[in-house]
Amino acid sequence: MFFRLLYRTMCGVILIIGTLDYSAWEGDLIGLAQKEGFDECAIAQASNMEEAFSVFFENLPVLIIADTSVEGGRENLEMLKTEEMYRHIPVIVVTEEYQANLYERLYTYGVDRLLTYKELASGVLPIIAKPLLVSSALFQLQIMRSNELQEKTLFDFIRLDLLKPYVPRTIWNMVQKNAAAQKLEIKEQEMELTLTFGDIKGFTTVSQHLKPVNVIKFLNVAFDTVTKHVYANDGDIDKFIGDAFFAVFKEPANAIKAMVSIQRELAAIRDKHLQDGDIAVQFRIAVHSGTVIRGNVGGNGRFDNTLIGDAVNTTSRLEHESPLGDILISEAAALKAGLNMPRSEMLEFDLRGRDKAIYAFPYFENVKKGLIEERY
């Protein structure tokens, strides 16, 4: 699991370096450590620095009590306190008697307390150790919380990375923008867009003869081409619906350019598939421009931010009239894209649910006839 947010067990090892007998204070030290939050605490004593290092790197101590009589002890403690990773570990140094130069040097390097043998024998060790164990516990807790936050952040990043490809880029960008502004709602907005619908010829028949996993592969061959050219031309995939796609563009010319690129690439793929005896992918596509509203549809915490309006319905129905392998472009989209196609040369369509006829023309067919100039 990435993280456990409630509680983690804090473990503590009190490392004693030297040969002095600390058995009289072990119970007090362990009790203090447990009181300050170290659920599991133990005393580890090392008679020399080699043993001390073995304990140190196996169980990072929460408190070090070291005798200066141990060979190399003072130098290693000074080195310890200069290391960023370890300087937070509190250190009590025990020495035979105070020496001014030793006292000054150890405190300069960050040793927390200095005790003489006489003071140690008086029983002050638990009193001296208590605030140091408090400090160590607070540091450990801070590290744990920091780790939990990092793990939670990592979890959130992975979750968002998993989710991102399943969300239209338009919605993703709106969410990012609203989150930065601390807005918890995506408001409805009216806009002028160019809409494109496309679906695959005979998909229902084809899918009957394929295993489900091969149906997905078949669709992805087509949709990989679609998404590549839609995104390359500043468009967005609003959704995939079975064997169909719905893509939107702010600029009509970009929409037409993307659809032309899709049909041309799919034609090349289709020719290769036919040569190899595979099933070919063939789209029919429609392009139309108009006013739509982007709004939230749903309830009870589950919404779909979708495009609504007559232009959406018109594009969808126009797509069913498109010749296979061609792109049926509406008069509205052609005018906005600067394609000078006279209405007299366009086809008239009486689409279901519309009071008036709509005019459109197949792009490739009319390029071949020379009625419009090939731009894309």
Image (spheres, rainbow, N blue to C red):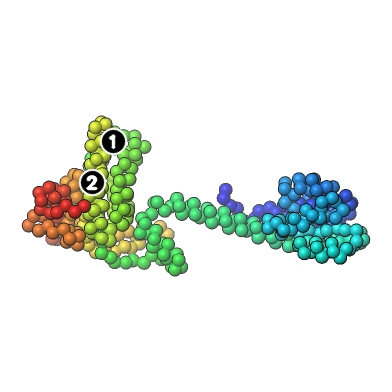
Instruction: Give residue 188's quadrant in the image.
Output: bottom left
Q: Nearer the viewer, mark 2 or mark 1?
A: 2
Instruction: Give residue 190's quadrant in the image.
Output: bottom left
In the rendered structure, the answer to whether residue 104 lies left or right of residue 10 reads right
In the rendered structure, the answer to whether residue 150 lies left or right of residue 273 reads right
> Dot 2, crowdedness within 10 Å: few (<14), some or many (≥20)?
many
- Residue 56 appears at what percent x and percent y? 75, 49
Q: Are marks 2 and 1 in contact (CB under 8 Å)?
A: no
Observer-nearest of 120 and 194: 120
Alpha-carbon span between mark 2 and mark 1: 25 Å
> Dot 1, crowdedness within 10 Å: few (<14), some or many (≥20)?
few
Taking the image as drawn, is residue 271 in sight? yes
Taking the image as drawn, is residue 62 in sight? no
- Residue labelled with disc 2: 263
Q: Amino acid at mark 2?
A: Gln
Q: Residue at x 44, y 68 (%)?
A: 181
Query: Which disc, if any, is residue 208?
Result: 1
